[in-house]
Amino acid sequence: MRIIDTEFESLKIVETYLFKDVRGVFGKTFNLDVFNSSKIHPYFNEFFYSVSKKGVIRGMHFQIPPFDNEKLVFVVKGKIIDVVLDIRKNFKTFGKYFSIELSDENKKALYVPKGFAHGFKGIQNENIVCYLTTSVYSKEHDCGIKWDSFGFNWNCKDPIVSERDRSFLPFSKFKSPF
C-alpha cells in the first residue's frame, strides 16, 4: 500500500493492494501501520456501501460536528468519479474541489478528512462503493451541499439524483461550521 498526498491538506489517495488469480480477487484497503506511518490515525466506527447505476450522482454529503467524520472510500465493483469539496473555511483550498476515478481495476481509494463534502457519479452499469467512517451516522448532523452548485462539471446529461440531494442549499448560501 502507498499513501499519496494531494494539494488539499490531509486529503490522501490510497493505492491499495489487489491480488488476482484463477479464483478471483483478494484486496487490502486498510492497514493501520501504513496509515499511522503517513500520520493518518483514523478509528473507523461504521462501514457503509451503496449500489448505484450508471449516471447516478450521490452527494455532496457530510456530517457536522460533533459527528463530523473522516472517510475511506473505495470501489469493489465498477467505476466512479469521486468528488470532494473543501468546506474548511480557514484553509486556502476552501471552496475548491478534487476529483479522482476510483474503480475495481485501478486499486485506488480516497481518504477524506473532516471538513469535506463528498459525492460521486456512477460510470458503469453497476457500481458498488464502500465507505468506512470515523463517526456513527447521526440524522440530526447529516448535511449536504447541492451537487451542481460549486463549479464541478459532472459530465452527465440526465443525472439520476435523489430528491434529498436536489434539496440541499447551493454552495453560495452554505455557512460552514468547519
Image: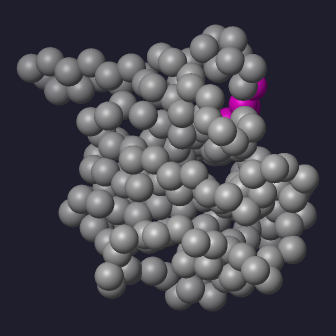
Who's the residue at 71% across and 84% down the image?
Answer: 169
Which residue is nearer to you in this view: 34 or 5? 5
Please check the rendered image and state whether residue 43 is part of the magenta-colored stretch, yes or no: yes
Query: Is the residue 76 above or below the residue 140 in the image?
Result: above
Q: Tell me where residue 145 appears, x and y as whole percent.
A: 67, 74
Who's the residue at 32% across and 82% down the image?
Answer: 157
Query: Is the residue 23 above or below the residue 88 in the image?
Result: above
Query: Is the residue 117 above or below the residue 32 in the image?
Result: below
Answer left or right for 154 relative to 106.
right
- Residue 76 appears in the rendering: yes
Which residue is nearer to you in this view: 12 or 65? 12
Q: Quadrant of residue 38?
A: top right
Write down the region rendered in magenta: 41-45
Q: Quadrant of residue 159?
A: bottom left
What secondary structure is the stretch in magenta mostly built from?
Answer: loop
Query: Is the residue 1 above or below the residue 72 in the image?
Result: above
Q: Tell me where residue 26 appears, x and y as whole percent.
A: 30, 23
Q: Tell me where residue 155 appears, x and y as whole percent.
A: 36, 71
Who's the residue at 81% across and 50% down the image?
Answer: 92
- Residue 49 appears in the rendering: no
